[in-house]
């Protein structure tokens, strides 16, 4: 029997050429290399994992894809992060879609400015491209379940995944 963990995170140390995002949601933890995660997965009986590029890596997906290519039988694929505020979204998505082990996009909406992306047009092109090209978009947005629901209705062709049920861990049980 194959067991796949569909939402894992591994990350390398902050490096000068690949620094961590200092605006990440949580304090900087110790690095968790792909090999460490894969060992823990094997010990837990997990056959393969899906890497969701963590927020602390910013929009740099290189380590996620490098590890997925180094361990093709153990890492099923990668949910990459993309900055929707940068230009040439279509070109960047095309490049990602061509990357071996690309599974989808993960968007993190934690700051007030980011939370507005669901209601303004910031994510429109992403959702349209996701629907057109058939890749899912995972959204981590604490307390924004209703807003995500509105996006799902507005972009019915896009497959939108809700990370952590959009629960706001600061308000027990709130959505």
Image (cartoon, rainbow, N blue to C red):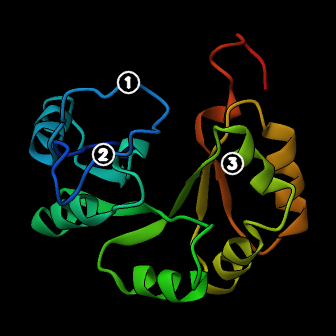
Dot 2: few (<14), some (14–19), or many (≥20) neighbours within 10 Å? Answer: many
Q: Mark 1 or mark 3: name the one nearer the start of the chain.
A: 1
Left or right, residue 116 beside residue 58: right
Left or right, residue 140 beside residue 8: right
Which of the 4 image quadrants contains residue 65? bottom left
Q: Mark 3 or mark 2: name the one nearer the start of the chain.
A: 2
Query: How far apart in space, not on screen, are marks 3 and 2 (Cα)?
Result: 19 Å
Q: Secondary structure at mark 3?
A: helix
User: Residue at 42% of width from left, 79% of height from top?
Assistant: 96
Left or right, residue 147 beside residue 45: right
User: Residue at 27% of width from left, 26% of height from top?
Assistant: 29
Q: Mark 1 or mark 2: name the one nearer the start of the chain.
A: 2
User: Residue at 79% of width from left, 38% of height from top?
Assistant: 145
Report the disc number at residue 19: none
Query: How far apart in space, not on screen, are marks 1 and 2 (Cα)?
Result: 11 Å
Camera-side residue of 124 and 102: 124
Residue 101 position within the rendered picture, expressed as x and y whole percent measured from the top left: 31, 72
The residue that mark 3 highlights is: 114
Q: Secondary structure at mark 1?
A: loop
- The answer to whether residue 42 is above or below residue 1 is above
- The answer to whether residue 14 is above or below residue 45 is below
Dot 3: few (<14), some (14–19), or many (≥20) neighbours within 10 Å? Answer: some
- Furthest residue in direction top, as rendered: 172
User: Residue at 42% of width from left, 59% of height from top?
Assistant: 59
The residue that mark 2 highlights is: 20
Left or right, residue 76 beside residue 124: left
Q: Secondary structure at mark 2?
A: loop
The residue that mark 1 highlights is: 27
């Amino acid at each position: 029997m194959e067991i796949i963990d569909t939402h894992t995170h591994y990350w390398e140390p902050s490096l000068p050429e690949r620094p961590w995002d200092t605006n990440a949601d949580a304090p900087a933890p110790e690095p968790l290399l792909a090999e460490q995660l894969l060992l823990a997965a094997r010990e837990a009986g997990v056959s393969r994992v899906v890497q969701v590029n963590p927020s602390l890596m910013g929009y740099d997906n290189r380590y996620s894809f490098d590890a997925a290519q180094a361990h093709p039988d153990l890492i099923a694929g990668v949910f990459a992060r993309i900055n929707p505020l940068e230009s040439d979204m279509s070109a960047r998505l095309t490049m990602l879609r061509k990357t071996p082990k690309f599974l989808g996009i993960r968007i993190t909406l934690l700051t007030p400015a980011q939370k507005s992306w669901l209601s303004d047009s910031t994510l429109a092109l992403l959702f349209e491209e996701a629907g057109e090209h058939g890749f899912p978009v995972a959204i981590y947005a604490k307390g924004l379940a209703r807003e995500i629901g509105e996006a799902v209705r507005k972009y019915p062709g896009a497959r939108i995944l809700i990370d952590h049920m959009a629960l706001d861990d600061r308000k027990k049980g709130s959505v």
